[in-house]
Image: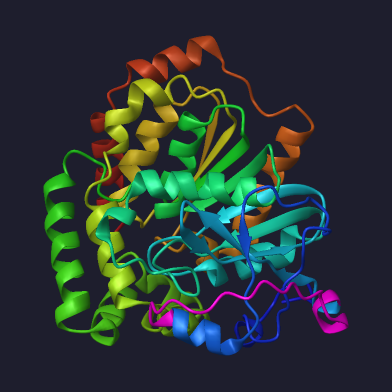
Amino acid sequence: MDANSASASDRPETSKWHGADHQGGLDAPVIPRDSAQDYDEHRCGIASPVSRRFLRPTSADMQRGTIAMPYVDACGVKLYVEETGQGRPIIFAHEFGSDLRSWDLQVSHFAKSHRCIVYNSRGYPPSDVPEDAALYGWEHAVGDIDAVMRGLGLDRAHLVGASMGAYAALQFGLRYPGRASAIVAAAAGSGCSPSQREQWLKQTSTLARSLIDRGLDVTADRIAHSPTRIQLKHKNHRAWREFADRLGRLSARGLSTTMVRYQMLRPSLYDSRDSLATLAIPVLLAVGDEDTPCVDTNLMLKACLPDAGLWICPNTGHTINLEEPAAFNAQVEGFLDAVERGCWRHEYPKSRQRLRNLDAEQAGSTISLAQRRMR
């Protein structure tokens, strides 16, 4: 990892807050913090005193290239934000099982040419972990992307989301047309396929209870060894260990409430097919061929999104950006470059009509059969 990327030990103790004179400006309310003590308190979901003093970046911060922003205010919930690099903005939204650090290999790559913005979702320290369950949900996740953009004074940005973050990015594109210049939806669609919906609801309910009843350590180990995440362990044990350790240090309450209020209650993407068919935004769909719960949904999304491309990465599970970072970065870079040059693919009427007439469930069954034969 190069100098543009901050290590886990740098967050947020050695990072300093910067004020409104930083490039980009700050339009929405921002809340600065000064101390590691604040961070430790926040990890437990305890509100900390708020300082009104802004500190400028130190020379070490500038050399590292990553600046910890003041927290942005998302309707009373504070979201921790970092940004690296300059250029067209890219906002990265993380998955359920990790936090902003899961994007380190992407930030170190794209910060050479773009302004990379990462944030922790509500429920993921040092962002707030609200006690009120009503403050969680997919609508709030969409609103949080809006809050980050307003907080940094951005009218438009590329969005890159993984799993839960990919769902929010697609819904953001529907709710705020014109504000997302491009969307990368990686590993989207867990629990969305009609054939898997009932099983998904049972699994997520059990997992949410386990986080509270059995504790985070036990449940984190179970998640890290799940059939769609074990691939990372076989490919890169160190990266898998870091993933598992990060997961084990998150907030059990934040994860459990996110699972119940967001993952379980969000509408299936299949229910949004008519709306998605009108989404006039370039989209790159990325999914691993061993991420079984997501493959069918991505075929459906490819069939209904008018300006989408689909990349299926071989021998890869759910953590696609961690398992194959070089390939993932190359695909995203090629996509964003084409979008920015105005030459991303446009709808081909005849082929698109054939895709729309293709039954998504039948297509998914065909792929699933092929996967079983490969095994």
Against 346, residue 2 (above or below) is: below
User: Left of 178 or right of it: where is 169?
Assistant: left
Of residues 42 and 179, the one drawn nearer to the viewer in this rendering: 42
**x and y percentages locating residue 231 in the rendered image:** 40, 70
On the question of residue 3 being in view, the answer is yes
**x and y percentages locating residue 74 in the rendered image:** 50, 53
Q: Is residue 44 magenta?
A: yes
On the question of residue 136 being in view, the answer is no
Q: Which quarter of the image is occupied by the N terminus?
A: bottom right
Against 364, residue 212 (above or below) is: below
The rendered magenta stretch, by its main secondary structure, is classed as loop
**x and y percentages locating residue 246 in the rendered image:** 45, 80
Of residues 184 and 299, the one drawn nearer to the viewer in this rendering: 184
Of residues 13 and 18, the one drawn nearer to the viewer in this rendering: 18
**x and y percentages locating residue 62 in the rendered image:** 85, 75
Of residues 371 and 254, the one drawn nearer to the viewer in this rendering: 254
Q: How many marks?
A: 0
User: Left of 259 or right of it: where is 325?
Assistant: right
Residue at x-position 49% and y-position 43%:
169
Residue at x-position 75% and y-position 40%:
337
Residue at x-position 50% and y-position 24%:
279
Which stretch appears magenta? 43-62
Residue at x-position 46% and y-position 85%:
41
Q: Which quarter of the image is occupied by the C terminus?
A: bottom left
Q: Is residue 257 magenta?
A: no
User: Left of 4 or right of it: where is 170?
Assistant: left
Colour option used: rainbow
